[in-house]
Structures are given as structure tokens and as C-alpha cells.
Image (cartoon, rainbow, N blue to C red):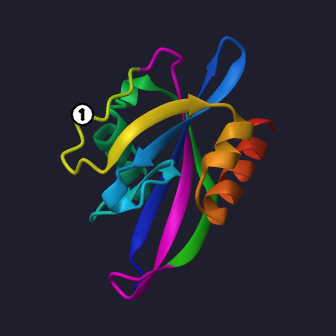
Amino acid sequence: MTPSQIGCIVFRENNNVREFLLLKRIPEKKGFWQYITGEVDNESLLNAVFREAQEEAGIEQNDVLRTIENVSSFEYKNVKKDCLVTEYVFGLEVKPKTKITLEKNIYKEHEEFKWVRLEEAMQLLHFKTSKESLKKLVQLIDI
């Protein structure tokens, strides 16, 4: 069975501007910008999304206004584990004043976060698959 991972693109509408949450990985983890990601640990994909959002950014379920499932999925090669991994991407719209904190993450994998507009997110995201997933999410939001 192929291991699973989730991607969670967090967004908000703030003063009629749509913003996306990006996290910057620490230098030891290559220092690139990404959305929330994480492994699925014997749980549903949706439970993994909520757990990772809470662990990585301090987002609680009551901060979430809506969840968009099945944004995209793709496979990639995990070099360290020498296997293919399937990533399932979700969207989470949060309240405009949701407090983001990196301090609760016991793994200390991110050093910075910021809310950015679509154009900047597309420039900052490191992986092509991340950019494609963001484009698909925007299409789903705007339906």
C-alpha cells in the first residue's frame, strides 16, 4: 500500500482580499515555502488535515469556516523512505482573525509564516505540484 500524506492549503478572506497561509521550512529542511503538509497516521484524511493544521499552525477546528475536500492528489517519490507517496490536498477557509502560531509544533520544522495573495503564493511555493494544487483550489473556491 502506498503511504499517504495530506496537504492543507489554508486561506482567508481579509477585508475583501483572499490570502493564503505559507510556512517557511527551517534551513535544515531546505528552507522553502509550502502549505501545511503531513503524514496520515492511522486516521482518516480529514482527521489528518485538522491534526496537522493544529500541530503546524495552531489552527483549531472552530477557526475553520469551510473545508474543501478533493482539491487534488498526486504521487511523488520519497527519497529518504525509497517509496512512492500519495498526497491528498484539501483547502481550509479560516476566520479572518485566526491566530497562527508555529510554537506548538513539537517538530520545529518551520521558522516563519505569512499570509500572501495568490500571485505571491505562486512565486513562493517551491514545488510545481503545490502550485498546481493552489490553482485547482482557487477554481473550486470561485465556483
Q: Which residue is drawn at 33% across and 83% down?
A: 81
**Can you say whether 87 is above or below 111 in the image?**
below
Rendered location of residue 88, percent (x, y): 53, 62
Rendered location of residue 19, percent (x, y): 63, 29
Q: In which quarter of the image is the C terminus?
A: top right
| Outermost residue, top side | 15
Asked if residue 81 is among those painted magenta in the image, a careful observer would answer: yes
| Outermost residue, bottom side | 82
Rendered location of residue 12, percent (x, y): 59, 26
The answer to which quarter of the image holds residue 14 is top right
Dot 1 amino acid type: Glu
Predominant SS along the magenta part? strand
Rendered location of residue 29, percent (x, y): 35, 60
The answer to which quarter of the image holds residue 130 is bottom right
Q: Nearer the viewer, residue 120 or 1?
A: 120
Q: Can residue 88 be seen in this view?
A: yes
Q: Which residue is drawn at 54% across and 17% down?
A: 96
Q: Residue at x 31, y 60 (%)?
A: 28
User: Alpha-carbon neighbours of circle 1 within 10 Å: few (<14), some, or many (≥20)?
Assistant: some
Give the secondary structure at mark 1: loop
Asked if residue 31 is among those painted magenta in the image, a careful observer would answer: no
Disc 1: which residue? 103
Q: Nearer the viewer, residue 36 or 70?
A: 36
Task: Give left or right: position of 137 versus 48.
Answer: right
Region of the chain picked out in magenta, as a range:
77-98
**Can you say whether 34 is above or below 104 in the image?**
below
Q: Is residue 39 visible?
A: no
